[in-house]
Amino acid sequence: MSEHVRVVIAGAGRFGALHARVWREAGADLAGVVDLDPARSAAFAETWGAEHHGTDLSEIIVDAEPDIVVIASDETAHTELALAALAAGRHVFMEKPFAMSVEDALGTVDAAQRAGREVIAGHISRFAEPYRAMRQALTAGRIGDLWSLRLRRDFSRQWFEDFGGRVDPVWESCIHDIDVALSFVRRPATRVYASRSEAAGANAPSVVSAIVEFAGGAMATIETAWTIPEGAPQTESGALALPGAIIAEAEAHGSTGVMRQRLQNDGLTVWNNAGSWSPNAFLWPVSGDRVGGAIRAEVEHALGVVRGAHGNTEMPMIEAVWGIAIAEAMTRSLETGAPEVPRNEGRL
């Protein structure tokens, strides 16, 4: 494989733009962009220097001849776009979620295996330094055998009002910590029980707590609440600045110790007449004129996979499927009020 990797971006929104910048800065050639809105696709191509643009991914693949398709579209279109890219023999980088059902996730893996290509799930938290440091400490035996994880990720209330109704917040926020848990445990789940706040009324999907039990005996508590008020400091800055906050914590308990970290960076705070900022320095910080952090790390990992430098070891497809099975079981448990066994289709 040539060092010059050609990329097509599927989805011309803010995450598509972030990917266009990072892939280009990492040395890839932006071969094309596709979006359902032709005007947005054309504007994106002009802004980011894409060679081709349009509304049909299959046509753009023929014209642009990419090595990999980066899917940053609406969640419900992920599977359709991935299958189109794989049918054309291209690798895929898939923004989370990997799919919206176990059936679709397994179908995507089957298509990738038939095509001899990889689908790299863009679970950015797996590449964030705080979680990497925790996994390294676990591997080094600093807390002994892993017994349990406590994972919390709270979002701004205004985000729930803006896009929380698009899909259940399980697929927007819990999916991050589901993958964080899998990156520690590296085994599928055996049972999931989830509940949401009855006191939240019509906003019930915004407050969710779940217990996930894994093969081998470890467990994780995963919580999310889209309730952070507007007065909280803005945390998401850098290459993608979002008004609002993500407040995340992770705690691991083992047979000989405990470790804990907070994703929010209290080391730097900024106040002025417009508000306050506590920048998240790990996801997509800008140093000089280049984007770094977890987004850069996952793109460089994907480039290495495409170039044949290494396998898809950081985010194996089967672990992405395990994550979808957990999220699906979590949403079922919220509906039934009972523990649910993740669907494995006899293959996980």
Image (cartoon, rainbow, N blue to C red):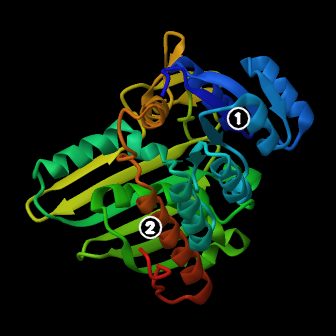
- Residue 202 visible in the current orientation: yes
**Which of 156 and 189 lies nearest the eye of the viewer?**
189
Compared with 265, 209 (above or below) is: below
Q: Position of residue 232 (x, y in %)?
A: 56, 41
**Nearer to us in this view, 189 or 10:** 10
The residue singled out by tag 2 in the image is 322
Say which residue appears at 36% left-offset and 60% top-offset. 182
Residue that badge 1 annotates? 14
Locate residue 156 relative to residue 116 in the image: left or right: right
Identity of the residue drawn at 75% across and 32% down: 33
Q: Nearer the viewer, residue 59 or 16?
A: 59
Residue kind at label 2, given as amino acid type: Trp
Who's the residue at 67% across and 58% down the image?
79
Disc 2 packing (10 Å; few <14; some 14–19; many ≥20)? many
Residue farthest to the right, as pictured: 39
Q: Position of residue 5 (x, y in %)?
A: 55, 26
Please determine whether, in this image, residue 31 is positioned above or below residue 195: above
